[in-house]
Structure formats: structure tokens, C-alpha cells
Image: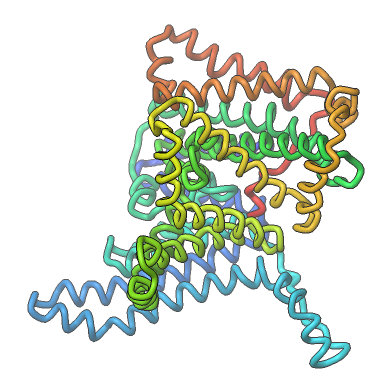
Amino acid sequence: MSFTSLPFLVLVLVSVGVYYLLPKKGQWVALLAASMVFYCVGGGKTVLYVFYTAATVYVSGRLLGHFNALRRAAPKEERKAITAKYKPYRRGVVLFACLANFVLLYILKYWNFTAELLQPLADQVSPGSQIPLSELVLPLGISYFIFQSVGYVIDVYRDKYQPEKNFAKLLLFVSFFPQMVQGPIGRFDQLAPQLLAQRSADYTNLKYGIQLMMWGYFKKMVIADRAAVLVNTVLDDPWSYSGSILAVGVLFYCIQLYGDFSGGIDIARGVARMFGIDLAENFRRPIFSTSLTDFWRRWHITLGAWMRDYLFYPLSLSKPFGRLGRFTRKHIKGKLGKILPTSLATFIVYFVIGIWHGANWRYVAFGFWNGGIITLSLLLAPQFLVWKEKLHINDKSLGWHIFQVVRTNILVFFGRYITRAPRFLTAVWMVKETFLHPNLPDLWNGTLLSLGLTGWDLAVLWIGVAIMLAAEWYQEKQGPIRPMLETKPVWFQWFTTMVLPLAILFCLGVLRADYIPEGFIYQQF
């Protein structure tokens, strides 16, 4: 069920109505029912995977909660001994939860890629043999609900909070429907209390939720889906175009992805806000990032935070990395010996973020691209300081800030060649064509108007991008827009946040004659 479909809007409208009409103690049941309807309509039988994940983490959480309770109930002088006694069992429970879910994710998302890699070896060992491929359907949002659920188990293991004893309530946390398309990846202690809270209908929540949804639909349907027309025309058949047109195609893909992902997050947060629920921030104006690290702190924030808390810290603080650190400090002089283990952990994190996106060599390369640049920047940081001092660069100057922003966006731009090209080798060829055979006259000889968008479409697109970036610039410099709007008359607030966006959506978006709805890009991840 797409966010941009009529059935989804009907589901939201009915769910909100039922939620506030039900007795407050049963409001969470309305959220669970809506989530099950959403998933059953959008994923069919794959809803069983959601139940499977919920069941494994429920059992794991209860077992860990039991061990934690034994430790807390013991006298202080005995707690250390009890912790040591049950440590293997507790780790075994976490290992079970991780394997039960990540093995499932691997089979569904990565097995066929692995089988294709191993097939030549199988042919050598046993000519004519065929490694079986998985024919299972990839469930909607599986990466999101598995990461969210495993994070819950690890937090219970760390005794951060008590496990949920009601399976249905935990199932709601695992499957809350606004998150299922493209996140954010929630934390149990932040999200679960909101899902289970008792509320009365609140005008502000409804207003803010609708306004946020409208802003998301504007970015998705007016900007992203319009840019997708040119992107699909060029990048689905890149061999038919010159290097300059390929660069335009990638640029429009950057626009499409920016509007698509941020718009989807706004819709998800807007729907949740109508129920009085604040989902975690997942997108914070990455266009203004000053480094690739800063970009990933702003883009898919909750994925980066998950990787930091459940992969980077466990890796960098593990015994093997501790031994590596002692070795490098002893045998490699200077700062390099001190930061090398941390840099390696950083590289692994960004490499995993790359392959999280999908089972394809281009995503492996995307992981290397981000991980390599970020790790290299960490290793060369002392040298950068020397260069800046010699060049008399003022770190606080506007010019240096602009340079950092432009540099970061160029790095992101070339990274998009990798993720959007049909294959990794095609991406390499596209970059080569961009520099060696640009054929610049294609940018003004009418070729752009033969790529599926009319001059009017291009004008609407660029105006839409300008509006989106102007709003983000205001937020970056002044903070949230809502407080400013609250100072205006009520009619102005509703005109700018409802009437005008609706008119734009209908005239320039969904009702335009050649409108073709595009699925959300991050939905496939």
C-alpha cells in the first residue's frame, strides 16, 4: 500500500477516527489493527515474517528480562557473581535473536547474490550443478523492522529497560505502519510509550500532522516523481546518451532521491503526529553538510545511529580491536597508530551501510566509496591541519564553509552514479563518459526536452526545488518554520500549508495528464 495511494489515505482517515473514538485504554489496538491492515494489503502473506520477528524478539526479551531480574534481586555483593554466571546464557539469547533475524534477512535479500558469486566455483567442483536460488518474496520494510527489533533485544540485554510482557504490544512496536516503508528505525524506550499512551483528540497534533504530510506529498509528487521521468529515460538506457546528459540524469536522480526520501519521511512523521506520536528525526537538511560524515549524520539519521550504537561501539570496544590498538600504538608511531583501529571500525560501519542498501556489486562499491573517503579523511586529518595552516585558511570563514558544502555535494553526486547505474561497471563507464565525452552542446541544443519532460515540467521542477531548498535554508539558519507560521493569522497558516499545497498537488502533481506514480526508492531497501 503506497503512501501516495487513495487506500492509504482512507486507512489513515479511518484509523485516526477510530483511534480517538475508542476508549483510551484500547487506542493502541486501533494502531495495531491499522498496521496489520497496511501490511496485509501491501505485503500479503509476508506479514508472517513480521510475526516471526516479533515472536523471536519477544521470547528473547522475556528471557533476558528474567536474567536481569535475578541480578537485580540479589544482594549487591552477589550481583557480580550472578552476572558472570549468567553471562554465557544472556549472550546466547542475543546471539539467537540476531541469527534468527539476520539469517532470515540474508536469505531473503542476499542469498541469490551469494549464489551467483559461488556458481562458478560450484561448476568447477561439480560440473552442471546448480546452486538453488531463493524464490521467496522480499517483505515490505524488512530491513527496518528487523533492525528495530534486534536493537530492542540488545537494549534489554544491556538492561536499558524492562522487556515488553504483552506480545501484541510488542508486535505493534515492530510493525507500526508509518515506519514500514522507509523508517525511521525507532528505539523501544522512545517509541513504545508513545504507541501505548492514552490521548484525546488534539487540534494541534492533527493540524501539524496534516501540514507535514502535505509538505511530504509536495516533495514526493511534484518534485521527485517529476524528476523520475527524466531519470528513468536516461539512466535506464545510459548507452544512448552523451556524458553531459548522463551527468544531468544523475543530477536529477539526486533531486529525485532527495525529494523522495525526505518526502516519505515527512509523510510518515505526519501520519504518526495525527495520533500524537513523534517519530524520530530521520532527515536533517543534508544538502548543507560540510563533510561526508556530516552528510550521513543528516541523511537516514536513525540508520546511522543504529550502526553507531550496535555495530561501531561493540566493534571498537571489543577485545580484538583492543589488541589491534595496542599493536598499532606500539609499532606505528604518531597519531596514525592511535586512530587506525577506530578508523577501521568506521570503515566497516560505512561499508555495511552500503551493502544494507541491497545485494549488488554497485552497493558493495557504494560502501567502499563512502567508507574509503571517510576513513581516509580521518587518517589524513593531521595533514589537513598542516595544509590549512600553510594556506592560511580561516576555518570560520564563509568561503571555507561554502567550499566544504560544495565539496561534500560533489562527493555525494559521484556516489549516486554508483547506486543508480544498472551495474557497477556501467557506473564506471558513465563517469568516464562524463569527463571524456561530455558533448556539451547537448545541454542547450534541445536534447533535454526530448527526455520526457516538457519545458513547463522543467520550470515546475526547478521552482519546486527552489521552494524546498528555501524552506530548508530557513530551517538551517532560523530553526523550525512552524513558530514563525504561528505568528501569522489562522487563514494564512491554512492557506500556505493546506490550500496552496493541495492546489499545487492536484494541478501539478497527481492530476496532471502524464503523471506516473513512482514507488518510494527506500522502500526496496
User: Which residue occupies the foreground of this view, 245 or 282?
Assistant: 245
**Left-right relation of 258 to 275:** right
Q: Is residue 445 above or below residue 420?
A: above
Res 152 quadrant in image = bottom left
**Left-right relation of 80 to 151:** left
Res 514 quadrant in image = top right
Residue located 33% across and 78% down the image: 90
User: Which residue occupies the foreground of this view, 285 or 195?
Assistant: 285
- Give the quadrant of the C terminus: bottom right
Residue 491: give x, y in percent of width and height: 48, 8
Residue 429 makes an appearance in the image: yes
Q: Is residue 56 above or below residue 354?
A: below
User: Which residue occupies the foreground of this view, 73 or 433?
Assistant: 433
Residue 451: give x, y in percent of width and height: 87, 32
Residue located 52% across and 75% down the image: 100
Residue 411: give x, y in percent of width and height: 61, 44
Residue 407: give x, y in percent of width and height: 57, 38
**Left-right relation of 444 to 57:** right
Res 84 quadrant in image = bottom left
